Amino acid sequence: MAGRADLRLGIADVAPSVSCRSYSARAVVGEWIPITATVFGEGHDLVAATVVWTAPKTAVGKPHIPAQGRGLVSYGAGGTDKNPGASRRQTVRMQPDGAEPDRWTCLVTPDTEGLWSFVVEAWRDPWGTWRHAVHAKLDAGQEAAELANDLETGARILDRAAGSANGPGRRTLRDTASQLRDDAADLTARVTSALSTAVDELVQATPVRELVTRSPRHEIWVDRQRALYGSWYEFFPRSEGGLDSDGRPVHATFADAAKRLPAIADMAFDVVYLPPIHPIGEVNRKGPNNTLDPGPDDVGSPWAIGSKHGGHDAIHPELGTEQDFADFVARTRELGMEVALDLALQCAPDHPWVTEHPEWFTAKPDGTIAYAENPPKKYQDIYPLNFDNDPAGLYAEILRVVKLWVDRGVRIFRVDNPHTKPLNFWHWLIWEIKKTDPDVLFLSEAFTRPAMMHTLAKLGFTQSYTYFTWRTGKSELEDYGRELARAADYMRPNFFVNTQDILHASLQVGGPVMFKIRAVLASMMAPSWGVYSGYELFEHRPLRPGSEEYLDSEKYQLRPRDYAAAEAAGQSLAPFLRRLNEIRRAHPALQQLRTVHFHAVENSNLLCFSKTDLSNSDVVLVVCSLDPHSAQIGTTALDLPALGLNWTDRFTAVDELTGAEFDWGQYNYVELGPHREVAHILRLRRPQIGFA
């Protein structure tokens, strides 16, 4: 509290607050947000606290932008203390949270997108202090004469409360003050009404506040719900052309790829993620498995963007036209999904920018342009952009490109390797887009150092790839789940079980059972999760031992798949993925991150966790095996209060995968394995405490 001489009462550790208000916290429409603060004062007088919760001041479509989004390089600028002048305000009473002394909490929920803000107000509570003192003195047997000053003090507080009350409540408060002053009545008659619950509720509705002290203003940027919750499915449209009469893959169009969309919708996915759909470079084009000797019919990597057919604003001619893409986007929406497009800011050697703007690239001493390298990997078909030589020109061009795709119906961008570009560029770009299109979302594909990953989330990225892919053991899953929950005020994880770049060793050797296990963990632990096509077919062959690259990677060649035949033969995970996504849609508890809670279970190969919505009206309990090869048994030791129960309670647990019902309590026997279900996904049902 250094530097705040105006703090008459103590207000400390207000949350959510991201990096001391350097960045706005994050939430989504309809999300219950816990606001907490430490509030205290000198002496024995009681203090109380409220939150003033303020809606965006500007109409949707032209939102007030967070303070840290207002400049080209000001991504560390602090939030503003100035009143944003919003038209809607709500005052929410805080309550002691019970976990630690002087800690207060309340829940608020935004109902629209944009920049919300809140201020914590601490105040001395004369009415609460008076009630506490009078109760204590009455319990000590003091008489009316000894309480004369106390009774008059109470009457004066009620007079003040009546001045703010309306209608019948005002009369009740004034009558109660008169009773306290009635010397002819006995002590019990004088205080009964004043100490009643009804009168206390009237005073609390318009409390008498003294020494009101306000915290600085805190900002919360509120996105649409898809920013927090959604199931993603990645596929390459070009691979959907099937085989010709000679058994050779045929390059698909958007019209061909649209035929795949109903099956994706049937698996209850929400987002269809497309790799880059732009013209692919012909210079230094890669062949199958990243080889350097492509044949004349090899298609190259979609991430080698740009050719004589255009750059980032163009569509690969073999996929179709702008109208074909518009039709694809429209069909996706008809099926209740939306398109996410890859934003990869890099160029093939024959991208138009290379000749039109050579200053946007890095030249070697010999005059050649440097291609991308991540030793020992070499990307001869990709030139990285240099953001330092002409930032104004490059920034403006990228903004134009992103706005063009927004105008074409793309509202989600999966951003390739953002950690290799300047932080202030992303900060500027994201908030420039938000100024006109606040519903546009950005997913950061930054498998990088934690500091960079977290900073990208703080400065504006809507979601983040995570290290989930490499977290396979019980303790590391628990630790990582807790870490992400602690960062929920600004970082929204997306748990991809695989990507076109990453085939984890656990999937290479774990068989179909491991594919089920990882799908359960990703879909139940994180509000957003994703799969790359082929996962449902258990594709697991690496390029070579020890590699996380797929053999015959779709990044470099067409890879048609017969999904329908596999499902008809019972060799597809699609029905299981569909059920997981259906469960997620049915349970609000699974659509948020903050309340993930891990429970003890006596087996290092069994993981047990729960998720609740913040009102505890929906509770889901998951027990999952981590072993794809052997049956695992164990006994849970559930933290029942975390489930909204008492330690001795019994409850009915309904398995959402099988429909089986169990009578459970704190300790429960569990057996899971490859020849039975790999997990219990349990809906708690106990009508007397409100469970559905």
Image (tube, rainbow, N blue to C red):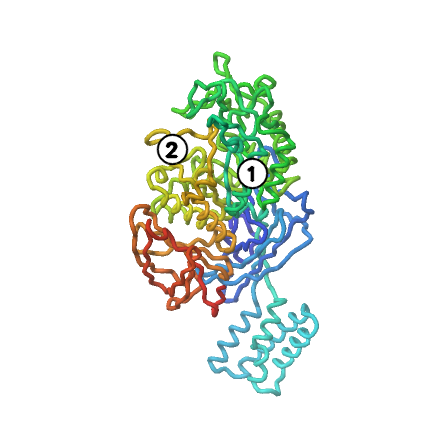
Query: Is 144 rendered above or below residue 347?
Result: below
Q: Distance between the residues labelled 2 and 1?
A: 30 Å
- Please state which amino acid type lies under the numbered disc 2: Glu
Q: Which of 113 and 209 is in front in this view?
A: 113
In the picture shown, does residue 629 fall above or below 178? Answer: above
User: Which residue is label 1 attached to?
Assistant: 259
- Name the disc covering residue 548, or none: 2
Please tell me whether mark 2 or mark 1 is closer to you in this view.
Answer: 1
Q: Residues within 10 Å of mark 2 (few under 14, many from 20)?
A: many
Q: What residue type is labelled 1?
A: Lys
Task: Look at the image and tell me whether residue 580 can be seen.
Answer: yes
Percent across and percent down for residue 299 are: 50, 24
Q: Is residue 153 visible?
A: no
The spot of residue 233 in percent (x, y) is 50, 41
Task: Identify the residue at the far front of this view.
Answer: 245
Residue at position x 38%, y 60% in the image: 639
Q: In this view, does 343 lie to the left or right of 605?
A: right
Identify the secondary structure beneath mark 2: loop
Viewer-proximal residue among 659 and 432: 659
Classify mark 1: residues with Cα within 10 Å, few (<14), some (14-19) or many (20+): some
Does residue 565 appear to the left or right of 388 in the view shown?
A: left
